[in-house]
Amino acid sequence: MTDINQLKKICSQVRRDIIRQVHAVNSGHPGGSLGCTEFMVALYFAIMDHDTDFNMDAKGEDVFFLSNGHISPLWYSVLSRAGYFDVEELSTFRKINTRLQGHPATHEGLPGIRVASGSLGQGLSVAIGTALSKKLNKDDKTVYILMGDGELQEGQVWEAAMAAAHHKVDNLIATVDWNGQQIDGATKDVMSLGDLEAKWKSFGWQVMHMDGNNIEEVIKTLGEAKEHSRQGTPIVILMKTEMGKGVDFMEGTHKWHGKAPNDELKEQALNQLEETLGDY
């Protein structure tokens, strides 16, 4: 799907899904979920070659891993809206015996989920292993991964980055949600990330930039990244987003990283987001 207006409508509905999921159980992470909506919608509805008839092997199809697993409300919404499972199942988010755990998990058998995530710093390693396996199997598809910027404070990320360059994992496109916020405050105050472009380049990666809240730019940049892949180096996209995007009182602050809105604020948020595909 490349109809920009339709993709924007999906984004609006996904944001409604996010708010309703976290409100229903007074738990979850709306801030980063709202901020990464355009990226995830573009990936599943315009970029990736994927099959909703889900299997763990992913032979002959692109693969996505969510390393910052706390933004699961976004991923669950996109997976359901893309056809991996019934949209009505979103109403079970974070409830007892649900397949929609607070952080994505595999033992419940939720379609679309290939690895448990949310313990930050691990996703890039998994993505590299998957990309290498595709190379060994002569599979020409691409592996995508999303990480948070606060997650880059984890040492394992940089061990994995070094390994990817050494092994020329050039069928991998990583994206960093560069919103400048993490659970305890701004990343610059918690632990400054320094010059991210220079860091990734020094580790042997090709670096690109994009505005993650502009879906046209997201589609364009991801397309360019795919065109520049398989040239001997892994690719990372530094994606500028605004935490809480789309809900004015949540935008640009870490305070909504992991807090659900009350009844009044839920309605205030939903009033800013058009219902385009029908609420579950």
Image: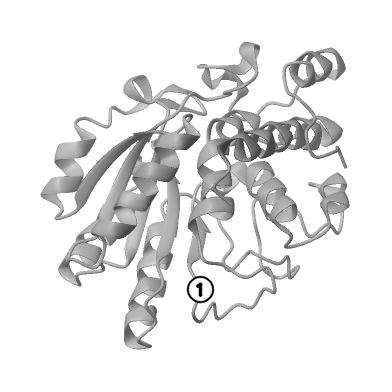
Q: Quadrant of residue 260?
A: top right
What type is the residue that disc 1 sits on? Glu
Where residue 137 appears, as percent x and y from the top left, is 38, 88
Left or right? Give the position of 180 relative to 280: left
Above-or-below relation of 273 to 1: above
Q: Is residue 236 visible?
A: yes
Residue 276 location (% of width, % of height): 78, 33
Q: Would you place residue 149 above or below residue 68 in this image?
A: above
Residue furthest front as drawn: 3
Q: Residue furthest left?
A: 202
Q: In front here: 232 or 9?
A: 9
**Residue at the extreme bottom:** 137
Relative horizontal placement of residue 47, taking residue 247 as reference (left or right):
left
Closer-to-camera residue (192/100): 100
Q: Quadrant of residue 125?
A: bottom left
Residue 261: x %, y % from top left: 76, 21
Q: Going by the image, does 64 lie left or right of 276?
A: left
Closer-to-camera residue (100/224): 224
Q: Position of residue 253 (x, y in %)?
A: 52, 17
Tell me which residue sits at (74%, 60%) in the image: 83
Left or right: residue 53 compared with residue 115? right
Tell me what residue is drawn at x 85 percent, y 53 percent: 89
Query: Would residue 102 be visible to someone looking at this image?
Result: no
- The image shows residue 218, relative to residue 116, as above or below, that is above
Residue with the mark numbered 1: 61
